[in-house]
Amino acid sequence: MEVNKPVPGTEGESPHAVRASTSAYLCLEQVVKRFGSTAAVDQVSLDIPRGAFATLLGPSGCGKTTLLRLIAGFHDPDGGAIYLDEQRIDHLPAHKRGAAMVFQDYALFPHLRVYDNVAYGLRLAGMRKLDIEQRVQETLQFVDLSGLVDRWPSQLSGGQQQRVALARALAVHPKVLLLDEPLSNLDASLRERMRWDLRALQQRLHITFVYVTHDQAEALAMSDWIAVMNRGRVEQWGTPREIYFHPRTPFLAEFVGAANLQAVTILTCTEGGLVIALGQHHLTLPAPAGRALGTGETVQLCIRPETLTITSQGMPVIPGVNSRGAHSIGLDGCITRSAFLGHVMRYWLCIDAREWIVDQASPDATAEPLHGAVTLWLDPDRIHLIAVA
């Protein structure tokens, strides 16, 4: 999978072109959308497999909703091409693209009952009345709303409204379902439950989902693939584990979860990797992919807080042994503050004038948090290097 790669031959290509067969089901090639002088979507290329749950993740204003609307047909691209099931669709009106969309505010018709909201797209498509009745009943049963066909939207809870919106989109049997932050209006507990309901539904239907969110936990929990966006471009496309444990940029490391980023200088390069210094320790770590680096250049260490351990200074410990046979290393420092987060205790440490964040499994209710002088233990196998642009 390559992101933001040049695609020869896109300019001037017929809008009716049939794309050569690839493994991608939904394919975006160098897609651009400008609003005035601002490129809201800037040469984005993505290959999304059939039946995948793909998420567009990023902060507000990064272009993720604009990209979703380009796929849906609510915006016209200023450049590039969009293919669905090998057919180019960016020239087609929205209702002929084979895509359906669930909006952030659900966009239910307040003057129509549940049944008529779900039937709306089927009637526009000219389906026969008996077929509409069967399709609506099947779809409402699928989302567990069979008993609510005569309710008005105002009589439904937030979760029920969300499922009606989902049923309306699914009723037309789309090739791809587009979801624009559909859980953002729900309370925390319902939102978490709906995550699993949505994921289970997608896996049962085997429909390609493209999901927009700014919630990192939501993206990591639900997705097969994630595109992290920033300033209209895709910073990285990969599996949730790749995005979390092997971020390519400092922005991505800090946006997806918490991260300890420490700038260090490369001491030397060997066949085994790059040699750097951390405290009094010299470590040999794998070089970042995709870029040649040399002695004297700066890289960022990326270390997730939950991969670290702290003990009071002087406490006897048996450091773990990592996969290369190297022992964990210890750095002495001091706790500056701590916070109880329920499932973890979060500590902030000062070591050699640098701040570190450490997450430890939450102790029982009577245990006192650590304080004062401590030793920070880290496993070199859990350190990821990021090239500095």
Image (cartoon, rainbow, N blue to C red):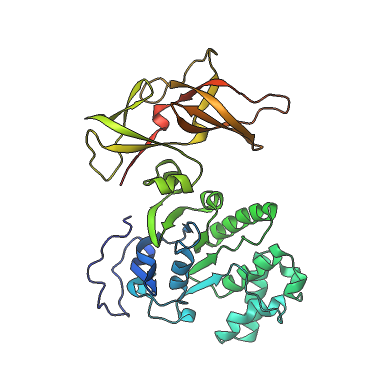
Quarter that holds the N terminus: bottom left
Q: Is residue 261 above or below residue 77?
A: above
Can residue 293 be seen in this snapshot?
yes
Pick whichever, 172 or 357, lies toward us. Answer: 357
Q: Quadrant of residue 118?
A: bottom right
Looking at the rendered structure, the number of numbered marks drawn on it comes to 0
* 209 versus 244 height, above or below: below
Left or right: where 192 falls relative to 314: right
Residue 338 position (above or below residue 319): below
Name the spot of residue 196 as percent of width and height, x first: 61, 53
Report the front residue among 276 and 92. Answer: 276
Left or right side of 329 for 79? left
> Residue visible at 58% across and 80% down?
121
Q: Position of residue 278 (x, y in %)?
A: 37, 26
Q: Position of residue 139 (x, y in %)?
A: 63, 70
Q: Give the residue at x 39% y 26%.
A: 323
Seen in the picture, residue 131 relative to 325 is either above or below; the reply is: below
Residue found at the far front of this picture: 353
Residue 198 location (% of width, % of height): 59, 58
Identity of the residue drawn at 46% across and 45% down? 254
Classify residue 11 by image quadrant. bottom left
Is residue 134 shown to the viewer in this render? no
In the picture, measured across the screen, residue 184 lies left or right of residue 276, that is right
**Rendering quarter of residue 122:** bottom right
